[in-house]
Amino acid sequence: MERADAVIAKTYKRFPVLLEKGSSSTLVDTDGRKYADFVAGIAVCNLGHAHPAVTRALTAQAQRLWHVSNLYYTRPQIDLAGWLVKNSFADRVFFCNSGAEANEAAIKLARKYYQERDQKQRFRIITMERSFHGRTMATLSATGQNKIKKGFDPVLEGFDFVPFDDVEALKSKIAEDTCAVMLEPVQGEGGVRCPAPGYLSAVREICDQNDVLLIFDEIQTGMGRTGKLFAYQNFDVEPDIMTLAKALANGLPIGAMLAKEQVADAFGPGAHATTFGGTPLVTAAALEVCKTLVDGKIIEQGRARAAYFRKKLHRLKERHSCIVDVRGIGLLLGIKVNFNAESMVVECMQRGFLINCIQEHILRFVPPLVITEEEIDALINCLDDLLRKEH
Ligand SMILES: *Cc1c(COP(=O)(O)O)cnc(C)c1O
């Protein structure tokens, strides 16, 4: 850890733990201490660590072919794109390497779509306050949190912000120069915030009435996290463009931008590109992740665990007045407390649980979908104990 502090960029305040291996929802550090993982790489390892089928698919592909340029066809990329198209609203997929890159592609596509239609003046994108869309210049500009932008002025022009879950605010902001509305169907980083019933369908309607594209950032909510393959399926509202990343390859770097044919059409040869997007190695693993999530009934299982977890969190709230809210959907869950909860993360870690704190007051739980009821019970007992002693 001392060596890390000497040579690694200081962009993360790390916890004093050196993790060595993992299996399913358990992690082990170099001292052999075990942790129940309620972070999952922040909603990345939805199948848990070292999933045997994914490891098999990855190693088989590693012996065959890692990378060729996107100037050529490779089968794993075709199969993954086919699977995503078959299982979503979309007709076409662009592969890249991260969430930020997927959102960059979505932003570029939305602008290009209108420029192809000789509507150069339509370039502005409305996003939400407290949103999170990434750390590249365009995606931090799209993010509705000042702390992410601080020190990087001037940010990219062309983003407008409205409060999440506020139909009237969106109606009054949308204008002739708006090309798209971009939002997370459920806000993750911003505080595990679900929209009110009807909000997303109202957003869809406003977009349609104004000839504006709708982009869903499902980087955190996708791949079964919310109890359905994609969060939009919980709300019966389809976007024109959707971005994926985090859990798509269960921890290998990948991003994807999916779009309807008519929109995707604006990206012709040469319009956008990336060296590593959709390599055979990563897409072979991602395809196995997708199949396991759906055919292996892991999403279904996650839904049951989520119901159990939520019930336990509500009971915990009844016992502790410092918990002011239980929120979230599927296994994207949070509790809001009336004190700064950052120290709770360390205390839970010392007791063998990895959890996450956002916006100072919200403990976020995004475990692998294979988390067990025993692990949930153990975490609830730990939280119960800590809250009784200290808060
Ligand atoms: C994590 C996240 C991103 C950024 O993804 P990176 O892979 O870190 O670039 C973007 N949007 C949402 C909603 C996220 O949760």
Image (cartoon, rainbow, N blue to C red):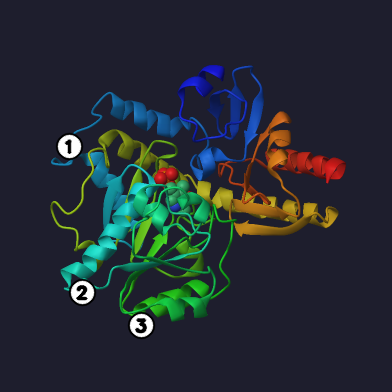
Up-down relation of residue 320 to residue 286 (above or below): below
Q: In front: mark 1 or mark 3?
A: 3
Give left or right: position of 36 versus 137: right
Q: Residue at x 56, y 18 (%)?
A: 2
Q: Secondary structure at mark 3?
A: helix
Question: In the displayed structure, does residue 251 sit left or right of residue 208?
Answer: right
Residue of label 1: 69
Does the image show residue 374?
no
Numbered circle sitting on residue 119: 2
Cα distance in 3D space between marks 3 and 2? 17 Å
Disc 1: residue Cβ within 8 A of ligand 1's nearest atom: no
Q: Position of residue 309 (x, y in %)?
A: 68, 50
Q: Amino acid at mark 2?
A: Gln
Mark-to-mark CA distance, 2 and 1: 33 Å
Q: Nearer the viewer, mark 2 or mark 1?
A: 2
Write down the residue under mark 3: 209
Instruction: Mark 3: give few (<14), some (14-19) or many (20+) Cα within 10 Å.
Output: few
Estimate the x, y position of residue 282 in percent, counting from the top left.
32, 36
Q: Counting residues from the N terminus, which is met first, the one under dot 3 or under dot 2?
A: 2
Quarter of the picture holding the N terminus? top right
CB under 8 Å between discs 3 and 2: no
Q: How many marks?
A: 3
* Residue sitting at x 37%, y 47%: 136
Foreground pick, 69 / 3:
3
Residue type at mark 3 is Gln
Q: Check disc 2: other Cα within 10 Å, few if <14, some if 14-19, many if 20+.
A: some
